[in-house]
Amino acid sequence: MGAKQLVLFIAFTFSLSGMAGNSYYVKPTGSDAKSGVSWDEAFRSVNAALAKADDGDTICLAGGEYEAVGGAYQITKDLTLIGGYQPDAYERSKPTVLRGEKNGNSRVLIIHGTLFKPIHVVLQNLTVTGGYAGNDGTIHSNGILVIANCGGGIYNRYANTEIRGGRILYNVTAEGNNAGYGGGIYHSEGSLTLAGGTEISGNIANGKGGGIFNNGGTVAVNAGTVIKENIATTGLGEGYGGGIANNTGTLTLSNGVVIEGNEAIHNTNNKSTGYGGGIYSDGKDASILLSGNVLIKNNKATTGTGKGIENGVFPDMTSTVSIFAGEGIFFAEQNADGSYEVEVIMEEDFRLDLTVDEKYRNTEPIAVASNGSRVIINKKAGDGQYTLHLPHLTEDVTVDLSLNYIVALPSGVEHAGIDPAPGNYTVPIGGRFEFAVTADEEYRNTLLTVFLSSGDTLDINSENEGKYVVSLVDITENITIDSMKFRCMVTFDIDSEYTVIESVPEKSLIALHDDLEFFVKVSEMHLHSKLLVFANGKPLTFFPTAMDGRYYILMTDITGNTVVKTKIGYPITFPAADKHVSITGDSIVTPHEDFAFTATVDNGYRNAKPVFFANGDTLKPDFSDAEAGRYDMTLPNVSGPVTIEMILNYTLTFDTVTVEHVLLESIFGDVAVTADSYFNFIVIVEEEYRNALLSVHANEASLIPTLENESGPARYRVTVPNIRKDTRIELSLSYHTATLLQTDGITTDVQPGKYIVSPVGDFDFTFTLDEGYNHTEPIVIANGKVVTPERKNDGSYKASLSAITEDKTIMVRANAINSLLKVNFTLPKNVNVHYIGYRFSDSQSLVFVKEDSARFSIETSDNLKPEVLVNGKSHPLTLTAGKYELFLQSISEDTDIKIRTENTGVALLPENAVKVYSRNGFLVVESPVEVPVTVYAFTGQIKIQCKVAGTESIALPKGLYLVKAGTETRKITVND
């Protein structure tokens, strides 16, 4: 059977591998004039799609009915037909019906290959019905020889065909006394596979195979296929195989196949013999292979008066019943190992008498069937006598027999649930039985007491979260659990060297919510020490009964298992612990023992540094994890009461190293500050810089300094509020300078010199003209810009410079208003110009008084040498301390200054550092550093190229030359 199944599977796999072709679509509302390549272009008829399709193509049929007008549908190519589609939704929800021609003499479907080229066909989700293969003789259809009276629904020959999820309903091969074969399907020379819950029912052959006639081919029926209510004949002749007739072929049935309610002859007047109501198999090479769960039932050979053979001409099918008996069970024909095997006709019952050994008469025999089917054990009259009953066998079955004791669980447990549920449970001899009790939340810290009918009790502690597991092991009798109750175990864990418990045992078992009273007696040598009594870690209140160290304690409403502990010793107190620190550790320590405790700092305060003191002495942690905020400490050999104090400090760090003109008052390093406090400090700014802007930041957050005095060095008070982390204090002083120059003929109310102005601050001053200048009009020039002073009633002038954003250089000139000249600078990128403290890097226009002189300092980026044009003419520069200086003497007109740069490729040198001249018929080049030298004849020809460092004489013919040495270019005449 396994080999034939493999062959069928390979054949099917081959057929699927060819289904990679095109798809064509058919729906009742389509048109055969369309292309059929989509639902929108769907054909109307199946024949149109069959004509269009080629080997390997798929035909998709929408739900609806398709009548085979003009004769059966014919498939002669490798095709797949899938029905049940709902157009536009691509869901298979509506049945697709292929119907034989109404009032016609036509099958529904002919599938026909050739002997040398069998075809591969898949039919899926299709209903084939209304077919009729009448007595029309052997016919040729489209060149194919088709045998008459065969295959009312489907005629399948020279084809490997699979039907998935299909229905073959109400098809007929012939009427009257004419012989017909395969009312539903006629199959010959090929393979036919029925799968996916296919149903074949209501078909009539009028001869052989009401459902299927297999003529020398291979038929595999599996995967839940149902063949029911088919009829081999309704006439007066013999009927063969109401469900299936297998003639010289191979029939395989497996995996949930049902053959039910079929009839070989359905005619009360028929006196002929009916063969195989369900299956008929005949022929030299005919074979039937069954595997898995195959059900063949309620089939009839005949309803007439003739002889009937119900299930075929082959021997009755049987089920093998295997019995395996455990210790103490006996029955007739039992093998030495307790086993027994017997063949039972399919669908019949099996019974077996059992006897149980006398010493196990209080047990119950239990039977378990391998296929899960029902096994009945009935007790007979007499001790230890039973009957095993297996009803309606349909397959092989193994039954294991064993003797079991009964464990009876009570119907309910107050305040808890039980698993498994209350009831009777069987346990093998010497076996084990466990059940779990889960207490309601209120009762989870209790002891579960189990009361057995024998009078014994079991005390069970909870494993986790109120779950109690009760284990009954090595069971040798029936066990009944009468009840289960939750109780509380009170255990006394006392310091026996110093205390004694009176009036109760070491362990006391009491009911839930009961009270318990007892006495604690302190040893005489410790009458003046401190006593503590705890129940599950919580302190209990107690009362002295006399001065003899005896104390009375009452525990009320006990709701769980409780451990009572006593402790006597020296008290450890934590007065006014920081609110951001939690302490874990006992509050009392036995004399001369070590005391350990752990301090944990709250998450938001863990960068603070806690300091601990024990009776005023500083404690050092045994272990610390600042990131986790944990500090473990130990007090060794405690010999008296201890007070532990703690302070949680943050560190203030002052960054003043780079701040000039600023001092901190009375601060000489880092400062420790307690959490959530504030800290005040004083900042002093030198008197000259009193007007500067003092900025203070705490971890980049701005603080506001408060000025406390009006003269002398500026004194600022600064407050750092709500300190919750280590803090870095940064100070900065921001200001601009206003430099007032001394000018002849001018008297100012402030002394000429440098003044400090806050950013965007103002600078004002008043001046008067000296005698001899009274009739002139003064002007004020700040950074080369004219500022018009305000003339006051007393003849003095007020100059105001507002919102200063840069350092200012200020001069006052008398009798100069009509002699002002402009000096305009045009600057390239990367050039800065300085003039008396004023610096600019973009083009500017400055004002000067006629005949004034001015000196400018020019800075460039590395390796860039400036070239200066004054009113279009090159102007010499001097190099001083790495900066170029431009000097304008006696400015007599408006002046345009343009500065440009070039990359020299060498270090900056004074303009005249490279010297080129002629001497004694030689060209002489002098340079303190190496420079490239190129000598050109005036014809453009290069005469010499070399590098010179120091002084070098170069021999050249007499003549005029152009010499380029470094950045210098000269015209040189070489004479004899």
Image (cartoon, rainbow, N blue to C red):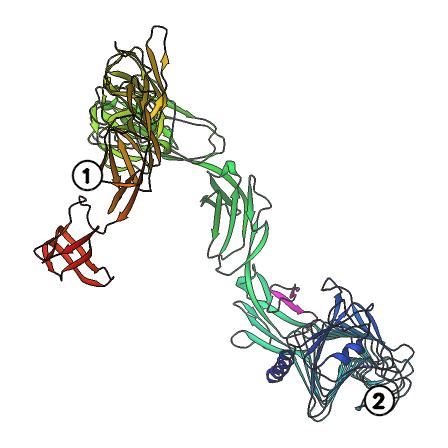
User: Depth check: 723 or 636 in front?
Assistant: 723
Q: In this rendering, is residue 798 above or below 128?
A: above
Residue 260 visible somewhere in the drawing: no
Q: Is residue 382 magenta?
A: yes
Query: Which dot marks residue 878?
Result: 1
Amino acid type, residue under disc 2 in the picture? Ala
Residue 788 image position (x, y, % from top left)? 37, 18
Q: Quadrant of residue 761?
A: top left
Q: Quadrant of residue 659?
A: top left
**Is disc 1 placed on a helix, strand or loop?**
strand
Looking at this view, name the residue that lies furthest to the top.
794
Looking at the rendering, the stretch of residues picked out in magenta corresponds to: 369-394
User: Depth check: 795 or 600 in front?
Assistant: 795
Q: Quadrant of residue 955?
A: bottom left
Mark before the other along the chain sequence, 1 or 2: 2
In this rendering, position of residue 207 left or right of residue 253: right
Q: Give the alpha-carbon distance from disc 1 to disc 2, as whole Å.
A: 127 Å
Q: Is residue 820 magenta?
A: no
Residue 778 image position (x, y, % from top left)? 32, 16
User: Depth check: 953 or 609 in front?
Assistant: 953
Residue 292 image position (x, y, % from top left)? 64, 75
Q: Which residue is mark 2?
A: 148
